[in-house]
Image (tube, rainbow, N blue to C red):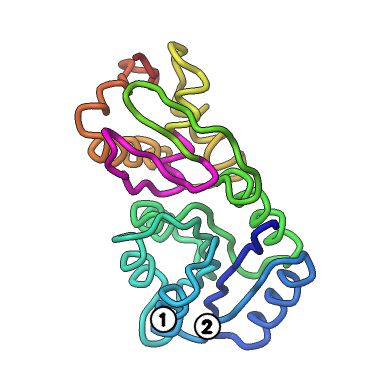
Amino acid sequence: MKKEIRILVAEDEDKLRDIVLKYIKKEGYDGFGAVDGEAALDLWAEKKPDLIVLDVMMPKMDGFEVLEEIRQTDNVPVIMLTARREEDDKIQGFESGTDDYVTKPFSPRELMVRIKALLKRSGVATAENRLDICGMQFTPEERQMTIDGETIQLTQKEYEILAYFINHQKLVLSREQILDRIWGFDYEGDIRVVDTTIKRLRKKLAEKGECIQTVRGIGYKFQK
């Protein structure tokens, strides 16, 4: 029996939250909502959602605080909603571990497209075979990567970058290529987010991080 995909929507605007949940349920997903940051954390702990839509500005705890708490133990895919366009906010979100941003006002249909794309990339909606490479084992349907039997918690962006490298071994990938592939052509933030994410990824991989090599003046490549 196919697992029902669970999506948490943390948004303090009742009307907007209800509209998003309506679209989510129309697509056949199990959607549930939170009115503030504390409620979002409670539902995350109770329901263990497969994806979270998280508003930045919420009562009690803002989206950044909620995300930082979640990322201590969970790499569930997260889309943040924001009414602010400041570049620093997006950089802060990506450094905290968000996977995508949608700026208000937005079309619910656009949000659903992003939700479906992120679910697919994360392996929640489509299962793939386990992959063993460079001493690392990947299980995409569980969004899991292990080294020597130890599970390494990666954010979705970290996981996607690593998968992108592995699928293009020995090829030099520019920062622009990585940005377009992982964050999308419409991403308006600073390209430094690529270096920041790769630095964090290497740290988590410890000695295996040496497989990601810097190509001075160009970008990176993956070399076993």
Q: Give me the residue at 59% from left, 85% from top.
A: 13
Q: Is residue 13 magenta?
A: no
Q: Could you tell me the amino acid type at mark 1?
A: Asp
Q: Could you tell me the amino acid type at mark 2?
A: Ala
* x and y, in percent, of residue 62 in the image: 39, 76
Mark 2 nearby-residue class (10 Å; few <14, some 14–19, many ≥20): many
Mark 1 or mark 2, whichever is nearer to me: 1
Of residue 141 and residue 191, the one placed in the foreground of this image is 141
Q: Where is residue 211, by image quadrant?
A: top left
Of all residues shown, which one is farthest toward the top? Answer: 170
**SS class of the residue under badge 1?**
helix
> Which residue is labeled 2 in the image?
34
**SS class of the residue under badge 2?**
strand
The range drawn in magenta is 140-161
> Which residue is labeled 1 in the image?
42
Separation of disc 1 and disc 2 at Cα? Answer: 9 Å
Q: Give me the residue at 45% from left, 78% from top.
A: 40
Q: Give me the residue at 71% from left, 60% from top.
A: 112
